[in-house]
Image (cartoon, rainbow, N blue to C red):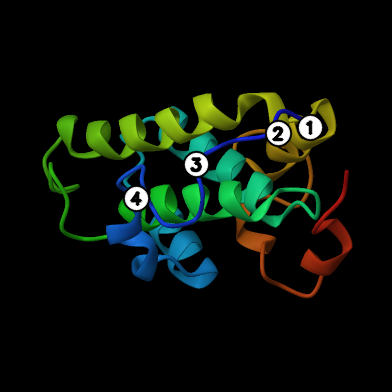
Amino acid sequence: MPQETNDSRGQDGTETFRHHYSEPALWEKVGAMPATASRAVVEVAVTLWVVLTHRETPAWARMLVIGALGYFICPVDAIPDGIPVAGYVDDLAVMLAVLAKLDAMVTPAMRARVRRLLPWSGGGAGIERIGGSTEGNERNET
């Protein structure tokens, strides 16, 4: 993987939102999203979580992901999530920017794991099972 010059000091602007991130808060936010919210928002959030939990993800990349997911979780951001249609646009933009930077790290196995975790995929565990007793079986798979 190419070396990245950005480090965990938050030169990317995500440092402000890192304190909002926690795994339970992420899944609570995803679970509470209205059905009208874009599937893309959920898919990108889950993809970032898979990158975050992968054992080979470098620390600088984890910090970017935590910042982006913290922004997604944060109740106060550029466009409040309660605004119909537009409420998740800023969250998606931040998460997509981070995912674009990390795209080379996302392996086919990681993409398959994301598909299995999506609630509409019918592919297995689903988001509702993340963090439960079966989570340890999937965490950090290649």
Q: Is residue 112 left or right of residue 104?
A: right
Q: CA distance from mark 1 to mark 4?
A: 27 Å
The residue pinned by badge 2 equals: 115
Q: Of callouts 3 and 2, which one flags the residue occurring earlier in the amino acid sequence?
A: 3
The C terminus lies in quadrant: top right
Q: Of callouts 4 and 3, which one flags the residue occurring earlier in the amino acid sequence?
A: 3
SS of the residue under disc 4? helix
Q: Which mark is residue 6?
A: 3
Q: Position of residue 111 (x, y in %)?
A: 73, 30
- The amino acid pointed to by label 3 is Asn
The N terminus lies in quadrant: top right
Count of marks, rendered view: 4
> Badge 4: few (under 14), some or many (20 or more) residues near its Cα, within 10 Å?
many
Q: CA distance from mark 1 to mark 3?
A: 28 Å
The residue pinned by badge 1 equals: 112
Q: Of callouts 4 and 2, which one flags the residue occurring earlier in the amino acid sequence?
A: 4
